[in-house]
Image: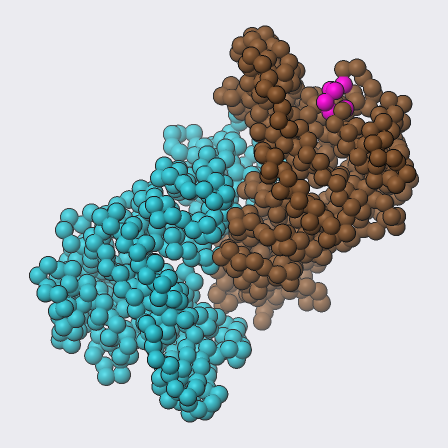
Chain colours: A cyan, B brown
Amino acid sequence: MDFLTLRRVAIDTYKENVAYLHRDCEQYRSEGFQALSKIEIHKVEDGPPVLAVLNVVDDAAITAPGELGLSEEAFVQLGVSEGAAVRVVHARPPASLGFVRRKIGGERLTLDEYRGIARDITGHRYSKIEMAAFLVACTETGMEREEVLYLTQAMVDTGDRLDWGEPLVADKHCIGGVPGNRTTMLIVPIVAAHGMLIPKTSSRAITSPAGTADTMEVLAEVGLKPERLREIVRHERGCLAWGGTAKLAPLDDILISVERPLAIDSPGQMVASILSKKSAAGATHLLIDIPLGPTAKVRTRSDALRLRKLFEYVGDRLGLHLEVVITDGRQPVGRGIGPLLEARDVMQVLDNDPQAPADLREKALQLAGLILEFDPDVRGGQGYVIARDILVSGRALAKMQAIVGAQGKTPRPPAPAQMRQEVAAPSSGVVTRIDNLQMARIARLAGAPMDKGAGVDLHVKLGDPVRRGQALYTIHAQFPADFGFAREAAEADNGFGVGDSLPPARI
Amino acid sequence: MDFLTLRRVAIDTYKENVAYLHRDCEQYRSEGFQALSKIEIHKVEDGPPVLAVLNVVDDAAITAPGELGLSEEAFVQLGVSEGAAVRVVHARPPASLGFVRRKIGGERLTLDEYRGIARDITGHRYSKIEMAAFLVACTETGMEREEVLYLTQAMVDTGDRLDWGEPLVADKHCIGGVPGNRTTMLIVPIVAAHGMLIPKTSSRAITSPAGTADTMEVLAEVGLKPERLREIVRHERGCLAWGGTAKLAPLDDILISVERPLAIDSPGQMVASILSKKSAAGATHLLIDIPLGPTAKVRTRSDALRLRKLFEYVGDRLGLHLEVVITDGRQPVGRGIGPLLEARDVMQVLDNDPQAPADLREKALQLAGLILEFDPDVRGGQGYVIARDILVSGRALAKMQAIVGAQGKTPRPPAPAQMRQEVAAPSSGVVTRIDNLQMARIARLAGAPMDKGAGVDLHVKLGDPVRRGQALYTIHAQFPADFGFAREAAEADNGFGVGDSLPPARI
């Protein structure tokens, strides 16, 4: 077996490792490699091989015969320097693909089989196509609840697990689907100010216009090293960080890189993804928020109840103390949709500003109250009052400022977006409908979450009277192309219904 | 909107278009593109845009700021020269992805929806991940038989369609799964020698050690231009060509590029793939071979009958005269597995060599006989006798030689593989079992179909007596790594069963 000279190819192929071999390379010819086949790259010293998909190159300036090129992430994974000698061999198809095929065939898999799949995926043995096949197979037949538990356990097993050394570590999670809804940034300071431990890590937006990590980033650093995070939490009792730096349930992160382009989101995947992350993050007490509404992720009460039971089943078996609440998801929560606009809403609530969005404030207090009642010393039913006292007294604001200071204040806060366009009510009446999906879509087209200042700012909510020509909301964008797309989308469907009266809520 | 300068990036990314933008490119920054997002590339003159997945580059030697790099196939698709001015914009997600999501949800799709999916896939609007999702969704819920018809029609609609200007155009197809089994290369010369039109185009191996196109290529050119193919068929009444050069049902070719790595093969996809290709190729009369056996693709008689009915349902509605036969798929057909070894078997039968594999000869005569009976002038039950006469008289060999000559004899026929290893019977008795899958796997590991001479040569078949230490088969390989893999696989499981007596066939 001959050696090749390692070369870093400065191409960012995201979560898929790509290796480059020149078409005239001896190794390419003699080993019968094919484009898109998977190869294993071994270094001379000990250490696990790196797996990559092969692209064939005809330009020696990219990768010359005798060289092996690696895309950026793969190069980092291999962990040796350019010019090092490496060997390549055919990668055998991962054994667990047989389990995926059986899942496609509608069969039930065991814990060991899910563990096998998890190991191979985190070992970069799956291509994106194979991961998509696994996800769709799980989505379509659905998984039995034991299988959801197995997948969750397999996800926890593939990564590190934090131990905070305390008997009560609180956390909360919303399943998403409702724009705005930035309650976490209110709950964490309230709960931490009470003294309860709440080391909150959040994801960035996957298909939404803003995640908690994107929004918190408007105010503070969120990409903190695990040791630093631990120190902040010890000192402040809470944090608002991005979860991507810790190696918690890395399988979930890899699967999300395929879920995102597919925009699939099955109950089983959702429960496994959320509970594995929380369990790995060391949470002992967890509040789950399931917004229910005609344009939310969960649209019927029976679906919401079924999802709640699935959370409870898996959570109980993982030893989590779990509380699941079904909330009003008929419309966005708060006014802003997009990182900067949502951060403004949050700060208005913390400032006790009379202009603060009442729905965001009320929902945050309700959820914070439930979490405070995890404390055995808090009497049932008293959580809300305690949460309100903490907010009104300014202790929540002070705690937020302390957390921002500890994480590191953003040196140059993002500026508001330059381009703005109001979208007017086409007729007079009462707001009867706000489409969560369409509002999220317009905000994303406007540039959120990539452009922090971009998004949508709502001026009226369900039940508010409007006159013809009055602004329903304002689109904020930073770049002309995005601005055009967002305005076009709003023209085709402004996302609002205006009628005679608001039908009674059936939440 | 600013223009970028087009650059050809000499990277072969197979069937997925990839575009490269430098991280510091103004366009990349101002338009908020993200790695792995899809972009549309427009040329200045009229013409459809090309869609590609974006990779971000940090090396100006690959793609500099102000340039747009395109991988080889994408560059060819755009059809302008290097240095041309191009514009890039965000690609909108294809509308038909909503149909795919509904299919994942288990819904039934309409003809128009399948047409929408087909148009977007052939327009390169789907990523490989999205295609995988579509395929798995179709595989898992299965498709209702009307949906299989719709998908077949949509596949036919996306490509060209041949018209041979004759009322009887014969074709045959085997669903695969049984190694060896190279009957097509015997049937075509027999049927063409009778004077019936049989313009046979075949695929290359997808997951098997050899396809008819790979095997024919040992003898003759198979990559013929459509005009040339038409001329050969007009003159010889038949051909044995690779189907990839004509633009017949291109959707099928694209889907196969995803099916291959996934190794999924559902009845609905199979029927749609086969019948769309045959219908587009202008066939009017079609024989389908379904091998049945414990290690074949179809393993129970009821599955075989169900598949036959699905073929009949779709074929009838497409106006095809269809005959479906269920054949003995308990073991490989013939002796050789791999292009060169299978071509040797075929030529032995055509030569009326007493050493020729009897099972291959007999099966080819049976199937050819059924096709000959498509001829209204052939009396029912007489087809077999006519086929045998054509073979024994040497007319089949003469026709094969004429077809090889017309297509162009291979200038340098591939040499037999250098490395050989016999695999011996571990005990004495009778051959009771030959595992099709394991034999195919060993042949592929040995290098087939990429290395024409590689594969497996069987020395005994079901029911043959063997003594301990006698060679069951010989592994042929060209390269040491492949040879090692194949021998290792045969050591772990030689694929044979040796026992007291062969259980009676239940085919």
Q: Quadrant of the C terminus of chain A?
A: bottom left
Quarter of the figure with residue B244:
top right
In the rendered view, tell whether residue B122 sits above or below residue B366. below
- Residue drawn at x 49%, y 68% is B30
Q: Is residue A496 magenta?
A: no
Does residue A16 appear left or right of residue B405 in this picture? Answer: left
Q: Residue at x 42, y 57 (%)?
A: A265
Q: Quadrant of residue A417?
A: bottom left
Residue A221 appears at what percent x and percent y? Answer: 29, 62
Q: Position of residue B451 (x, y in %)?
A: 66, 28
Q: For this view, does B228 lie left or right of residue B492?
A: right
Direction from residue B227 to residue A262 in the image, left or right: left
Residue A308 in the image: x percent, y percent? 31, 59
Figure check: A196 above or below B373: below
Residue visible at 38% across and 66% down in the picture: A300
Position of B218 with respect to B41 (left or right) is right
The answer to which image quadrant residue A431 occupies is bottom left
Q: Is residue B120 above or below residue B274?
A: below
Q: Is residue B414 visible?
A: no
**B363 or A452, nearer to the observer:** B363
Q: How many marks?
A: 0
Residue A467 visible in the shown view: yes
**Segment colored magenta:** B356-361
Give the percent coordinates (x, y) of residue B55.
52, 54
Residue depicted at 46% across the width and 57% down the height: A264
| Prevailing SS of the magenta stretch | helix
Extreme-left residue of the structure: A377
Against A75, is B428 above or below? above
